[in-house]
Amino acid sequence: MSSTIDHSRIQTELKLLFLSTPVGPLGSGLGGGVELTLTNLIQELQRRGHTLQVVAPENSAASNASLVTIPGELQPTAHTQGRASPIIMPGNSALAGMWNYAGRIQQDYDLLVNFAYDWLPFYLTPFFSRSIAHFISMGSLTTAMDQVIHQVALQFPGTIGVYTRTQAETFPFAEYCRCLGSAVDLSLYQFCDRSGPWLVWLGRISPEKGLEDAVAAAQRSQTPLKILGKLEDKDYWRQICKDYPDAPIEYLGFLSTVELQQIVRQCRALLMTPRWIEAFGNVAIEALACGVPVITYRRGGPAGIVREGKTGWLVEPDSVEGLVAAIARIDQLSRRACRQQAEAEYSLTALGDRFEQWFRDILTSRD
Ligand code: UDP
């Protein structure tokens, strides 16, 4: 099965094939934070001289990359399914088309990188001659996914990447996961020393994100709340609007990074209210990059990002009173310290170093 890799190149520039998430077009927001991670990696790895091609569903946009789009039906998102759910493959699947394409052109690349939290790429891994690095963007959700990833982790050690240790620990194969973190392109987020009166909530509007608690806290504290993000579950959103008719909230839609940071940087704090174990919480570091503190439940990725009492407050999970109390203490936090934390811990250079080393380790161990 094995075919020749140009070993001199492993030390220098790499040819990488990135396979995006099949739950939505790249740029649509349906893929959540992994879209931002992918965009950041494209930028940083190309800057280092690596060659990249991205394969993504139809209607994707990636201004900074060579892109091949594949038509077909999108995958349903994993977080809406129960733990025992079977694997779903729609007819005319975009995911199947993407991996069919990858199979045909794999010899032109040193390494394939999978960004899909879907069964098929893991199942196909032993049938590919090129190595595949799998970046997992969510915690454990279904038994079927855990099993297929576990098999790949055992058969191809070192090829499973995750955002955080907390995320890895949701899986039965935590010790096989390589933590790669996340980053922001700091040049895109402008520091803002002074804020307006608003709080902000960012993300996919979907039950696992717990938006209703942020809305309840805005209502109780009578603090205006701006809401930005993909309206993934319309019934859920309608229910929130019905339950809190008088909350001082404003929904601004799904915005591009440039537009998003223009709003976020004027806000007093970001509220994060996840019901699930958030793998990372990219919105937290985007807020910090603008100098905006983060108030979050002490749960999952965001709890590991916030420096309590410096760049945010950690709140007892699911406690609206806790959120209200933290909102009253926002002024004790330093906006300058928030930006400094983003600069020190979440730069694109650091992200590029970690991913580049991961790819080289996989290629070297496959020899
Ligand atoms: N986002 C965006 N526009 C918006 C609101 C959110 O581009 O109006 C992006 C945000 O930049 C972040 C992503 O949505 O990259 C949410 O990612 P996160 O890691 O916070 O959560 P996930 O959706 O992956 O669970």
Image (spheres, rainbow, N blue to C red):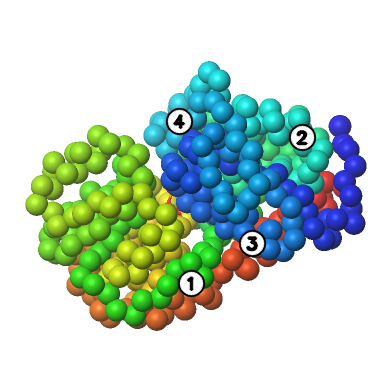
Q: Earlier in the sequence, mark 4 or mark 1?
A: 4
Q: Residue at x 38, y 59 (%)?
A: 259
365 horizontally vs 277: left or right: right
Q: Which residue is mark 3?
A: 44
Crowdedness near tag 3: few (<14), some (14–19) or many (≥20) residues, C-alpha within 10 Å = many
Q: Which residue is mark 4?
A: 76
As measured in the structure, the alpha-carbon distance from the residue carrying label 2 to the one carrying label 1 is 38 Å
Residue sitting farthest toward the top? 91
* Tag nearer the camera, 2 or 1: 2
> Hey, what amino acid is under mark 3?
Glu
Q: Which residue is mark 2?
A: 105
Asked if disc 4 and disc 1 are in contact, CB closer than 8 Å, the reply is no
Crowdedness near tag 2: few (<14), some (14–19) or many (≥20) residues, C-alpha within 10 Å = few
Crowdedness near tag 1: few (<14), some (14–19) or many (≥20) residues, C-alpha within 10 Å = many
Q: Is residue 308 visible?
A: no
* Tag nearer the camera, 4 or 2: 2
Mark 4 lies on a secondary structure that is loop
Q: Position of residue 175 (x, y in %)?
A: 63, 51
